Amino acid sequence: MPKNPTIPKRFWEDAQWVRNNYSELLRKYPDRWIAVVGKKVICSGKNLSRVRSIAKRKTSRSLIYSTYIGCGHHVY
């Protein structure tokens, strides 16, 4: 886990939880952005800005772990 005093430990714990549960998250949220707080998905959607906005409104936190759960069908 990175050590950065400006980023709370809970943020890195949520990031690790996503990595550990990626298969299950892929089944539930394919090709969607998710926001995670307390090792739980609190919202998901196709638009990152909207997901972050909803997550902030639900939690009043400014720093929330969010990531894209891609199924790998896209070509970049």
Image (cartoon, grey):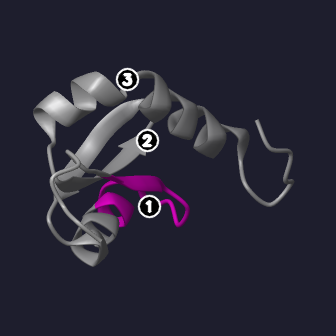
Residue shown at the point (26%, 64%) measured from the top left: 51
Looking at the rendered structure, the secondary structure element under dot 3 is loop
Q: Position of residue 20 (x, y in %)?
A: 46, 22
Identify the magenta region. Answer: 55-68
Q: Earlier in the sequence, mark 1 or mark 2?
A: 2
Looking at the rendered structure, the secondary structure element under dot 1 is loop
The residue positioned farthest toward the bottom in the image shown? 49
Between circles 1 and 2, the one closer to the viewer is 2
**Visible residue check, residue 38:** no
Distance between the Cα atoms at labels 3 and 2? 14 Å
Task: Provide the residue designation for mark 2.
Answer: 37
Mark drawn on residue 60: 1
**Visible residue check, residue 16:** yes
Label 1 sits on what residue type?
A: Ser
Distance between the Cα atoms at labels 1 and 2? 11 Å
Q: Nearer the viewer, residue 72 or 19?
A: 72
Q: Position of residue 16 (x, y in %)?
A: 56, 31
Q: Quadrant of the C terminus?
A: bottom left
Locate residue 19 relative to residue 71 in the image: left or right.
right
Mark drawn on residue 21: 3
- The answer to whether 70 is drawn above or below residue 45 in the figure is above
Q: Earlier in the sequence, mark 1 or mark 3?
A: 3
Q: Nearer the viewer, residue 43 or 66?
A: 66
Residue shown at the point (14%, 29%) measured from the top left: 27
Q: Quadrant of the N terminus?
A: top right
Locate residue 14 relative to residue 11 in the image: left or right.
left
Label 3 sits on what residue type?
A: Asn
